[in-house]
Image (cartoon, grey):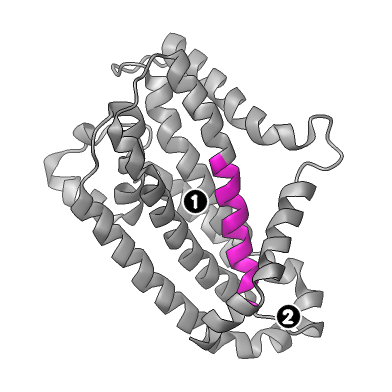
Amino acid sequence: MTTLRELYEYREMLFSMVKKDLRTRYRGSFLGFLWTFVNPLLQLIVYSIVFSTIMRMNIYNFAMFLFVALLPWIFFSTSITQSTTIMMANSNLVKKIYFPRIILPISVALTGFMNMIFGFVIVFIALIIFKIQLSASIILLPIVMINELLFVIGLNIVFSALNIFFRDLEHILGIITMAWFYLTPIIFPVTMIPDKYLKLFFLNPMTSIILPYRDILYYGLWPSKKSLLLVFLMSLCFDIFAFIFFDRLQRRFAEEI
């Protein structure tokens, strides 16, 4: 509760860090902030060409099938990767100025979340172009996105703390996320998973986080409300663990950095 109170007291600092990161990410580039929209647009064009002419999948409009799940994955993988180095990148702040250190990994998650929201502008435009109709299930999309944000915040907090004591984590995490990508039904439908391995795939929390995006945006289906609730509770419990874990380790941050 003390950490939550401090986060509320330093909320302006948190929002300022997110704004600064969003403004400076593409500073000096020709297109600037437009890259937030151009990147997902270029990805969509590449996937459309590759999977419609070269690697033909027996899935209708495979580019969109992939894209609506890939964008949330990019938010997830980019955020946890960046969170591992956020403490070292801000070592001067950590050692010299008092503020809730937990703000740093949370700001990474919120910045990535904002980028994903901007990317969804391209997704909705593409859905219109490809004539994929949205259903009333779209009203659950914010819940799906919040579930993912909560899970990412927890992971960011844990990895940002661990990397201070175990500097190889940032390199190991690259391998882990690559394997994690192929263990999540992003480039293939769930129906391709053999029945004997299906339960194992659903032990992966990202499976239950990614699939609702596809249900809502591609299939126009209502995701399982029970599954959404379970993911929310899981993410909330993991966040509580992450806050306690971070609080225990942060006392040694200054001397380790």
Q: Pick whichever, 111 or 86, lies toward us.
A: 111
Q: Is residue 81 visible?
A: no
Q: Quick one: SS at disc 1? A: helix
Residue at 62% in and 90% down? 251
Which span of residues is magenta-colored? 101-117
User: In the rendering, which numbered label is found on residue 76?
Assistant: 1
Q: Are there few (<14), some (14-19), or many (20+) residues within 10 Å of tag 1?
A: many
Residue 233 highlighted magenta (yes or no): no
Check disc 2 and give the amino acid type. Ile
Residue 107 highlighted magenta (yes or no): yes
Q: Pick whichever, 113 or 171, lies toward us.
A: 113
Q: Looking at the image, is 254 positioned above or below residue 186?
A: below
Are discs 1 and 2 less than 8 Å apart at CB?
no
Q: Looking at the image, is 75 positioned above or below residue 3?
A: above
Q: Residue furthest top?
A: 53
Check disc 1 and give the amino acid type. Phe
